[in-house]
Image (cartoon, rainbow, N blue to C red):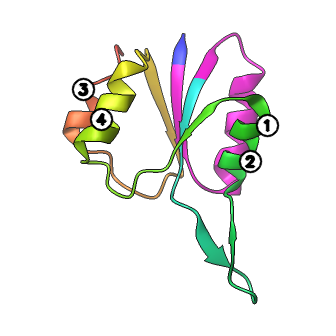
Amino acid sequence: MNIIFFGSDDFAAVHLEALFCSAHKVIACVTQPDKPKGRGMRVQFSRIKTIALERGVAVLQPKDLNEEDFRKTVKSLHCDLFVVIAYGRFLPEALLQIPAY
């Protein structure tokens, strides 16, 4: 089963790792855009982005989930299922209609 994973924090990262150990295939990860953090306000990747890049999986970081280009990109991946864990935003109905299940 081809999965697009939506998540942004360390709690979600644990579940993403579990998916990589399963029989399913994570074909892309969607996470919040990179933001400055810490005292030095340096831009840091989310744990989700770091894991995805280490595994060679595409990372999508839309500012707006209603963007037509983002929806076209997701649709072009032909996923079977979304897994959403601690993403931080509601997914619009048009986006939820994309996966097969």
Which residue is found at the position 75% from the left and 89% from the top? 39
Three-letter code, disc 3? Gln
Depth check, front residue: 68 or 51: 68
Depth check, front residue: 82 or 70: 70
Would residue 8 be counted in the magenta stretch? Answer: yes
Asked whether the beta carbons under mark 1 and mark 2 sit within 8 Å of each other, the answer is yes
Q: Give, as a single range, the part of the protein colored magenta.
A: 3-26
Instruction: Name the residue carrying label 3.
Output: 97
Q: Residue 59: percent from the left, percent from the top?
A: 57, 40
Three-letter code, disc 4? Arg
Q: Secondary structure at mark 1?
A: helix
Q: Given this view, does label 2 or label 3 mark the residue nearer the observer?
A: 2
| Mark closer to the chain start, 4 or 3 | 4
- The dot on residue 54 is 1
**Vertically, is 79 above or below 93?**
above
Three-letter code, disc 1? Glu
Which residue occupies the extreme bottom position in the image? 39
For the residues labelled 4 and 1, the Cα–Cα distance comes to 25 Å
For the residues labelled 2 and 3, the Cα–Cα distance comes to 28 Å
Three-letter code, disc 2? Thr
Q: Secondary structure at mark 4?
A: helix
Q: Name the image quarter holding residue 81.
A: top left
For the residues labelled 4 and 3, the Cα–Cα distance comes to 10 Å
- How packed mark 2 is, by other alpha carbons closer than 10 Å (few <14, some 14-19, many 20 or more), is some
Which residue is found at the position 51% from the left and 59% from the top? 33
